[in-house]
Image (cartoon, rainbow, N blue to C red):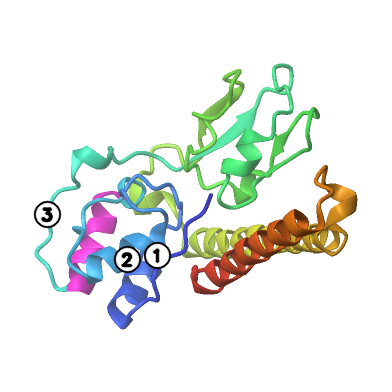
Amino acid sequence: MTLPALPLGKLASRILDALPQTQCTRCGYPDCAGYANAIEEGQADINQCPPGGQMGAARLAQIAGFDERPLNPTFGQEGPRSVVYIDEDWCIGCTLCIDACPTDAIIGSNKRMHTVIERFCTGCELCLPVCPVDCIVLENASGTATGWSAWSPAQAQLARERYAFSGARRKRAKDEKTQAMQALAKAKLENLAAHSRIIEPQVLAQKKVIIEAAMARARAKRRTDPD
């Protein structure tokens, strides 16, 4: 599940623009925007993005006004840009990879084989550990080019747009599910006697008060929680 990033400051926005937008989380943050925020706030270093490689670290150092330093191996090694494909002979249609993909690059449905839209795949590898049958294979998509040399600005921009699209779609689906559940709960509450084994009017009234209070707390929590 994608976590929302904090509002970006001016420096964080410039840093975000210089990241390859894989949304891979290898930097230790939930997405590229989260990493950019952390750099601006002094909580992360400029050498934690393996997909950007040493060139990416140098770009971030220049933007942030830091000295350039080697890519931190704790977060991974620089390598070529990669994409995944699914061995359809082994795919069981579990949809776990679809849920894990930050750019909606995998399509399919429950108990139907899935496939990858290659141009949308950032090579983030988040789909690999969730596959229960190991039918997802990582492929080199940039030959000998590694780090930022393996990416073009157009590819990074497309990945960023796909991530935003995916986040909006997931939020919309979550909101629709919440609204459906609220409507169902309201309908049952309005006719509680028909949906309960309790027949005593006083006990039913007390239960209704408890349920209404719980629903009010849930609504209040949704208003204060970030999207």
**Residue 65: x %, y % from top left:** 14, 73
Which residue shows up at 29% across the image and 49% down it? Answer: 53
Crowding at label 3, few (<14), some or many (≥20) Cα neighbours within 10 Å? few
- Up-down relation of residue 127 to residue 29 (above or below): above
Rounded to the nearest angstrom, the CA distance separating label 1 from label 2 is 5 Å
Q: What is the span of residues highlighted in magenta in the rendered image?
A: 53-64
- Up-down relation of residue 137 to residue 49 (above or below): above
Which residue shows up at 56% across the image and 26% down it? Answer: 137
Tag 1 residue: 33
Chief secondary structure of the magenta portion = helix
Tag 2 residue: 36
Q: Is residue 22 magenta?
A: no
Q: Amino acid at mark 1?
A: Ala
Crowding at label 2, few (<14), some or many (≥20) Cα neighbours within 10 Å? many
**Mark 1 touches mark 2? (CB < 8 Å):** yes
**Image quadrant assignment for residue 7:** bottom left
